Amino acid sequence: MANIDVSVETDDKPAPPPNHPNTCPSCHSHYRDDELERALWVCAHCGHHFVMRSRPRIASLVDEGSFVEEAADLHSEDPLGFFDLRPYTERLAEAEMATGLADAMVVGQATIDGRGCALAVMDFAFMGGSMGSVVGEKLSRACDSAVERGVPLIAVTSSGGARMQEGILALMQLPKTVAAVEDLHDAGQAMISVMAHPTTGGVLASFATLGDVLLAEPGALMAFAGPRVVQGVTKEKLPDDFGLAEQNYRFGNLDAIVRRPELRPTLAKLLRLFDAPV
Amino acid sequence: MPPSEHELRLRERLSRLRNMPLLGGVKLSGELDRLQRQLDRIGVEATDEDIWRSVELARHEKRPYTLDYVERLLEDWFELHGDRGRADDGAMITGLGKLDGRTVAVVGQQKGRDIHERAERRFGMSNPEGYLKAMRVMELAERHGFPVLSLVDTPGAYPGVAAEQHGQGGTIAASQAVMARLTVPTVACVIGEGGSGGAVAIALADRVLMQENAIYSVISPEGCAMILWRDAGEARKAAAAFKPDAAHCLELGVIDGIVPEPRGGAHMDHDAAAALLGESIREALEDLVDIPGDELRRRRRAKFRSLGVFA
C-alpha cells in the first residue's frame, strides 16, 4: 500500500521547540514572558498551569508590600561531602546563581485581604524543589512564626521529594516537618496546604498533606512514587490521570482543585473562615 | 595514634549533646553513657566496602524478620489484623505481646521467606492500608498506655497504582503524625532495610535504634544510582556517597544507638540476634517509662525538630 503524503507546506515560521519554557507542553501555544506573567503562568488557550517561581507566586497571593521574608540567610551545608558526577556544593552554588535563592523554600509573614498569615512557598527551580535540611528548618520556623503571631500557615509546595545529596538527613526532614506541624496544630493554628505541580515523594509524605485544608492546582502531579517508578515496578497500565490532582480529588485525597487566578480569593476566604487576625 | 577525624566528630557531637537542654533531667547520664560506649565501639571509620557489606547483610535472605524477633522476645504474642476499612496488609505486622511482663504494642514490616510469602507480603512494601493498620494499633496502644515497639524493615512503601489512589503519601505523613502525638514510650529499631518514607512512617520514636548491619536511607542505592549516575549498576558508588550504614546514622544524630549483631551478621544466629535486640529494647524502655507522657512527646518532637545541618 502506498504511503500518502499529507504534509502541507506553509509560510509559517517554524514552531518553537516544544520544550521551551514559554511553550505550553499541553497545547504547544507559545507566549512572550510578559504574556505569561500577566496570565499568572496559565496557558490562555488550554488552561495548563506552568510551574510558577516562588517570588511571583508570593506577589500573586499577598497584599502588595505586605510580605516580610524570614530566615532568608539559611544555607545548606554538605554533611556527607556528597559527590556524584559533581560535588553537591557545586550544584548548590549553581542553583543559587540561577535562582537568586539560598534554597528551595521562601518563608515569611504577610497579609491577604488584610488578614495575617505565615507563608512557606517552595521553588521548583532550585534543585527540583528538593527538601533538605534548609527546607525542613524553614518550614519548621514558619510553623513557630505562625504560632508566635497567632496566624494560620499557608504552604505552597512544588517539589521532587527529599534531596538525595543530604542522605539520611534529608529523610529526617519528613519527621521534622511533621513534628513542627503537630506543634502548630496543638497551638490551635490552622494550616492550609496548596499543592502545585509537582508535589511528590517526601514532601507529599510529610507536611504538605497535613494541612487542615488541602488544595491543589489543576494538573498537579501529587504522587509518592512517580509514574515511571510505578510503571517500572508493577508493570501495571497507568490510568491517564495517574497521580494527578484530578485523580487525587476523585479518590478523596483533596478538598479542592483551585485554578491559579482563584487561589488568592480562595485563600482569603479560608483565612476569614479560620478567623485569621485582621 | 591520634584520633581519627571521624572519632573527633563523634566526640564533638557527644559534647554538644551534653549541653543540649532537651536531654536534661531524669536519665541524662544513662543516655550519655550509652553514647560513650557506642563511641568506643565504632572507633573506626566505615570504609566503602564496609558500607556495601551492610547493604548486603541488611537484605540477606536469611536475616531475621519482625515475626522472628516477636516470637523470641514476647510472651503471649497475639497478632492484630486489618485496617478496619479496606484490607489486611501482610507487609505490615501489628500485634500485642508481653515484654518482661509489660504489654507492648508492636508494629513492623515483614518481608517473607519463600517466593509465595514474599509476593503476598510484597517484600515488606506496605500499601496505605498497612500504615492505616499501624496507626490503628498505635492509637490502641495510646488508649491503654502500652509502649509501642516498631521494627523497621522495608525497601520502601509500595509504588502501586492503587497505593497512590488510596493516598500513599498522605498516609505516610499521617502515620508519622500519630507517632508525634503519642504520649506512650516509643522505641523503633531498623532491623534490616530502612527504606525512605516507607520506613520513617513508623520510626518517629523516642528512641531510634539500628542493628549493626542495618541500613537507613533516603533512597535505595539502586534508585540513587539510577537518578544521579543514570545507571542502577552504580549502586555501590551511590551507597558510598550517601552512607546508609549505622555508624554514619549515629554520627549524624539520626539514631540514638546501635544494636550489636552476632558475629557475621544477624542471619547467622537468630536467637542470639534476638537476645541482643531484646537487651537494647529493654534498656531504651527503662529510660522512658518513668517520663511523663507530655514530657515524652515534647522531647520526641524537639529531637526530630533539631535534625538537619545548615549554616
Image: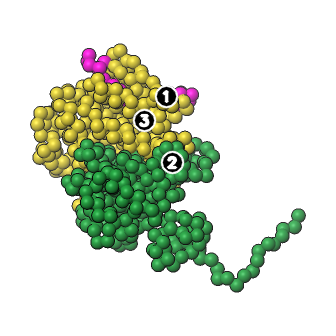
Residue A53, given in percent of the width and then of the height, sits at 41, 67
Secondary structure found at label 1: loop
Question: Which numbered tag is attached to residue B111?
Answer: none
Q: Which residues are magenta?
A: B98-118
Q: Residue at label 3?
A: B131
**Closer-to-camera residue (A9/A155):** A155
Q: How is the image coloured?
A: by chain
The answer, for residue B235, to whether it is visible in the render is no
Name the mark on residue B88: 1
Chain at tag 3: B
Chain letter for the residue marked with disc 1 in the picture: B
The answer for which chain carries disc 2 is A
Task: Say what amino acid the circle numbered 2 marks.
Answer: Asn
Give me the C-alpha separation between circle 2 and circle 1.
23 Å
| Circle 3: element type | helix
Q: Determine the colour of chain A.
A: green
Pick the residue in front: A60 or B142: A60
Q: Secondary structure at mark 2?
A: helix
Residue beneath the point at 34% across and 30% down = B138
**Residue B78 in magenta?**
no
**Proximity of marks 2 and 1: CB atoms separated by less than 8 Å:** no
- Displayed quadrant of residue B217: top left
Label 2 belongs to which residue? A248
Tags 1 and 3 in contact by the CB under 8 Å rule? Answer: no
Image location of residue B12, percent across then percent down: 16, 50
Colour yellow, chain: B
Q: Residue furthest right?
A: A1
Amino acid carrying label 1: it is Asp
Question: Which image quadrant: the C terminus of chain B?
Answer: bottom left
